[in-house]
C-alpha cells in the first residue's frame, strides 16, 4: 500500500502539530475504516480572519467557523483541502475543557468526514458525525 499523501500547512500563524507522523497514519486509518482510499489531503491551519475570508468568498457566509473542507476526490479516493481555524480550535478547547491538541484532532476528523461524504446539516447527521469523531479520537494514538 502506498503511503498517504497527507500534508500540513500554516497560513499566517505559528503552530506545530504534535506527533505529525502518527497523525498521518491515524488520518489514513480513518479514511480506510470508512471504506475509502486516502488520496491527497492537505490540512491548512489558519486564523479566524483567514477562514472568514474563505467562508465569505466560497460559501457566501459571513460567520466564524472552525473548519471548511474542499472536496477534490471522488467516491472512492478521498482528497481535498481542510482549512482549520486555530483561533476557533483554541476557543472551543477552552469552552469544552479539552486540550487544544484533542480539539484540533476532532476538527481534523470532522473535516475529513465531510470529505468522505458525511453531513452535519441535520440533527441525525450531526449526531452520527459526533459519534464517529468520538470513535476515531479514541483510536489515537495508534498502537
Image: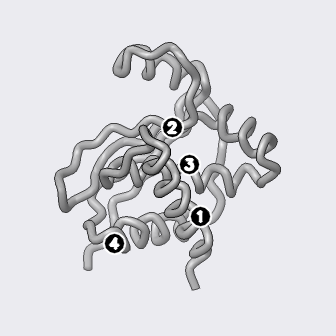
On the rendered image, what quadrant is the N terminus found in?
bottom left
Q: In the image, which disc is placed on residue 67?
A: 2
Spatial distance from mark 3 to mark 4, Cα to Cα? 18 Å
Measure the C-alpha gap from mark 1 to mark 2.
Answer: 17 Å
Decide: few, some or many residues near mark 2? Use Cα within 10 Å; few <14, some 14-19, many ≥20. many
Question: Residue at (46%, 71%) from the top-left corner?
Answer: 25
Foreground mark, 1 or 4, reads 1
Helix, strand or loop under label 2:
strand
Quarter of the image for residue 89 reads top right
- Of 142 and 11, the residue lying toward us: 142
- Give the residue number, with chain letter if any, for mark 1: 134
Residue 51 percent coordinates (x, y): 51, 25
Q: Give the Cα separation between the discs numbered 3 and 2.
A: 7 Å
Question: Does the CB distance between marks 3 and 2 fall below 8 Å?
Answer: yes
First along the sequence among labels 3 and 2: 2
Q: Is residue 4 left or right of residue 96?
A: left
Sequence-earlier tag: 4 or 2: 4
> How was the colour assigned to the protein in this rendering?
one colour
Q: Which of the labelled discs sits on residue 123, or is there none? A: none
- In the picture of the structure, the residue carrying the numbered disc 3 is 107
Amino acid at each position: 500500500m502506498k503511503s498517504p499523501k497527507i500534508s500540513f500547512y500554516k497560513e499566517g500563524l505559528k503552530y506545530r502539530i504534535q506527533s505529525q507522523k502518527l497523525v498521518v497514519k491515524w488520518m489514513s486509518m480513518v479514511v480506510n475504516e470508512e471504506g475509502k482510499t486516502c488520496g491527497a489531503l492537505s490540512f491548512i491551519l489558519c486564523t479566524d480572519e483567514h477562514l472568514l475570508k474563505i467562508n465569505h468568498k466560497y460559501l457566501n457566509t459571513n460567520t466564524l467557523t472552525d473548519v471548511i473542507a474542499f472536496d477534490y476526490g471522488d467516491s472512492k479516493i478521498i482528497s481535498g483541502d481542510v482549512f482549520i481555524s486555530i483561533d476557533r480550535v483554541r476557543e472551543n478547547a477552552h469552552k469544552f475543557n479539552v486540550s487544544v491538541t484533542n480539539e484540533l484532532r476532532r476538527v481534523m476528523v470532522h473535516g475529513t468526514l465531510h470529505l468522505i461524504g458525511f453531513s452535519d446539516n441535520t440533527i441525525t447527521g450531526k449526531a452520527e458525525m459526533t459519534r464517529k469523531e468520538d470513535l476515531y479520537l479514541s483510536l489515537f494514538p495508534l498502537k
